[in-house]
């Protein structure tokens, strides 16, 4: 009888989560008429356009996840070592919560206002550094430009995710290390970094998935259908030129899910190893 | 605690680099939104800010987004929270599967959910009527992992079994236990979850854009195509609004429980 209580929730998640997921996965193995075939899977796998987009997406996500994770972790460290509950801490956390959600439309406007045509930095650069790349807005629309934009929401997300872990570092460990004559770098090398590594990797993985699935920012900034996989999916789904191609959209989505699942399984394996190792100590 | 000079230099250099990176674009937004029209390079004008109230599509879009947020919150309050409590109290066997189900959206990019839901959405809007309910359904799935995190942390902190037993002995019905006894004790967790719901719905673009739903972000993008200064002004205004809101709302370890990926 008790099982009846979860039925409404199950029905709801079934409709809005499990059904869409299933429809994507099974749809990847069908053509546009619902006939079972792997033609689309193969076609996409060997398509140079899809490969370039996938490569771009992976490169962008890896880069921004690593850069965002490192800078975000460093910034979280400055918060953790600062005065807890002070106004700097409070403002930084509030700003991070707001900016982590900042991706998309408003982010693009912020960067266009900064580096774009008639923007703040561009105006200054044309005046004082006319030969630098800042004096021309075109770099913003390249891979590097996208990476700079993505990092803008990756850093705050990292701060939010990583701060609790840093705050759980026991000050006693540092004291013990100091009392036994350990230097600062020895503390970090032998205690701090090993303890933090699993959660750091977990947070970096979250950042990777976050930028891998990001669509809004790139869509508004470059509006070029073939550049990244999420853009390609949206084009295949809605297609303003010619008929839409749901099988293609589903197959591309399937490949995206495969990448995320591989990344998450790798992380799960790592965690298992770590917890085994922790038990052995 | 006294910090050594080295640590202080490190701290301040990190802080200044990150602050420069995060704050310059925000200042540039202010600068851009007060630039005079055209290329006249002098003075400040609040033309863009004054034009915000006269944007026709903007306020219906804000209303629409807020209604969607309200529906998402209702789904959390009357579906997700009661189910989480129910599983906690009556079905400990299902705790692990329930957790996995709640964390599943972390592994599925929003755009993939859109691809899967598009046929269903089309069917609903043709055969039933176009309503924000479908959109709210998808959104509530997107924030499910975060809601789950804050809820399970809150539920673990209170001994709800004892509460429930005491209430049962005193003759409470199960509905009363869930809504009147357990839910008030995990109020902070619920408030945090709802707050994420508002932030997500107001900032969401991907799904609503592809499903042709004119939400707040979609309309900002649309304004940006005709008048950049106004769009930048609106963005900055909404960002400031969110930051002030976050500062005003009491933050008691909010992020820790909500976004801790440590236990995935």
Image (cartoon, coloured by chain):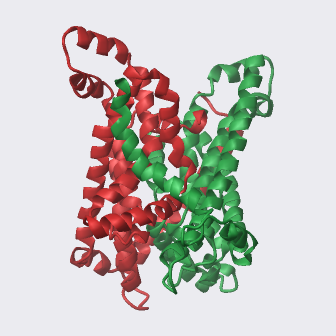
Chain colours: A green, B red
**Count of marks placed on residues:** 0
Residue A218 against residue B195 in the figure, above or below: below
Residue B195 is situated, as x and y percent measured from the top left of the image, at: 35, 45
Residue A49 is situated, as x and y percent measured from the top left of the image, at: 70, 77
Residue most extreme to the left: B171
One can see residue B2 in this view:
yes
B5 with respect to A281 (left or right): left
B162 with respect to B27 (left or right): left
Residue B80 against residue B39 in the figure, above or below: above
Return the residue nearer the eye: B107 or B152.
B107
For the point 62% across and 64% down, the residue is A36
For the point 61% across and 29% down, the residue is B2
Residue A11 lies in what quarter of the image? top left
Return the residue nearer the eye: B207 or B115.
B115
For the point 62% across and 23% down, the residue is A170
Placement of the N terminus of chain B among the 4 image quadrants: top right
Residue A59 is situated, as x and y percent measured from the top left of the image, at: 72, 64
Placement of the C terminus of chain B among the 4 image quadrants: top right
One can see residue B142 in this view:
no
Residue most extreme to the front: A35
Residue A267 is situated, as x and y percent measured from the top left of the image, at: 69, 41
For the point 33% across and 30% down, the residue is A5
């Amino acid at each position: 009888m008790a099982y009846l209580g979860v039925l409404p929730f199950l029905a709801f998640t079934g409709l809005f989560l499990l059904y869409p997921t299933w429809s994507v996965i099974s749809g990847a193995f069908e053509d546009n008429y619902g006939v079972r075939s792997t033609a689309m899977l193969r076609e996409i796998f060997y398509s140079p356009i899809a490969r370039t987009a996938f490569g771009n997406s992976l490169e962008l996500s890896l880069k921004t996840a690593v850069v965002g994770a490192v800078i975000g972790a460093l910034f979280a460290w400055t918060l953790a070592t600062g005065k807890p509950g002070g106004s700097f801490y409070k403002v930084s956390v509030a700003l991070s919560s707001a900016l982590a959600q900042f991706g998309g439309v408003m982010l693009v406007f912020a960067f266009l206002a900064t580096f774009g045509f008639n923007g703040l930095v561009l105006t200054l650069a044309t005046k004082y550094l006319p030969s630098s790349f800042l004096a021309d807005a075109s770099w913003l629309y390249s891979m590097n430009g996208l990476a700079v934009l993505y990092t803008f929401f990756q850093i705050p997300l990292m701060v939010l995710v990583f701060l609790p872990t840093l705050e759980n570092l026991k000050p006693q460990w540092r004291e013990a290390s100091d009392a036994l004559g350990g230097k600062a770098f020895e503390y970090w090398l032998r205690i701090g970094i090993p303890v933090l590594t699993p959660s750091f990797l977990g947070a970096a993985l979250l950042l990777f998935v976050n930028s891998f699935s990001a669509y809004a920012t790139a869509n508004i900034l470059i509006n070029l259908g073939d550049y990244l996989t999420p853009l390609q999916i949206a084009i295949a789904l809605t297609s303003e030129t010619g008929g839409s191609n749901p099988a293609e959209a589903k197959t591309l989505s399937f490949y995206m899910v495969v990448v995320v699942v591989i990344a998450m399984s790798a992380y799960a394996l790592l965690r298992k190893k770590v917890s085994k190792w922790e038990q052995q100590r | 605690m006294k910090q050594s000079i080295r640590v202080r230099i490190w701290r301040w250099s990190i802080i200044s680099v990150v602050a420069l990176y995060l704050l310059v674009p925000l200042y540039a937004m202010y600068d851009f939104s007060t630039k005079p029209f055209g290329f006249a390079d002098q003075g400040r004008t609040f033309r863009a800010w004054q034009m915000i109230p006269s944007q026709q599509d903007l306020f219906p879009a804000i209303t629409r987004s807020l209604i969607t947020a309200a529906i998402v919150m209702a789904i959390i309050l009357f579906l997700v929270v009661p189910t989480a409590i129910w599983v906690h109290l009556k079905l400990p066997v299902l705790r692990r599967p329930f957790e996995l189900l709640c964390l599943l959206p972390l592994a599925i990019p929003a755009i993939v959910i859109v691809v899967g839901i598009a046929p269903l959405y089309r069917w609903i809007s043709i055969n039933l009527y176009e309503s924000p309910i479908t959109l709210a359904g998808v959104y509530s799935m997107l924030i499910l992992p975060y809601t789950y995190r804050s809820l399970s942390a809150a539920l673990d902190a209170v001994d709800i079994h004892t509460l429930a037993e005491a209430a049962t002995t005193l003759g409470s019905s199960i509905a009363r236990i869930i809504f009147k006894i357990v839910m008030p004790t995990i109020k902070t967790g619920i408030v945090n979850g709802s707050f994420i719901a508002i932030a997500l719905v107001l900032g969401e673009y991907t799904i609503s854009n592809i499903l042709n739903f004119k939400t707040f972000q979609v309309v900002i993008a649309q304004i940006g195509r005709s008048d950049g200064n106004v769009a930048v002004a609106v963005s900055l205004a909404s960002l400031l609004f969110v930051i002030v809101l976050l500062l005003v709302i009491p933050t008691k370890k909010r992020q820790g429980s909500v976004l801790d990926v440590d236990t995935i």
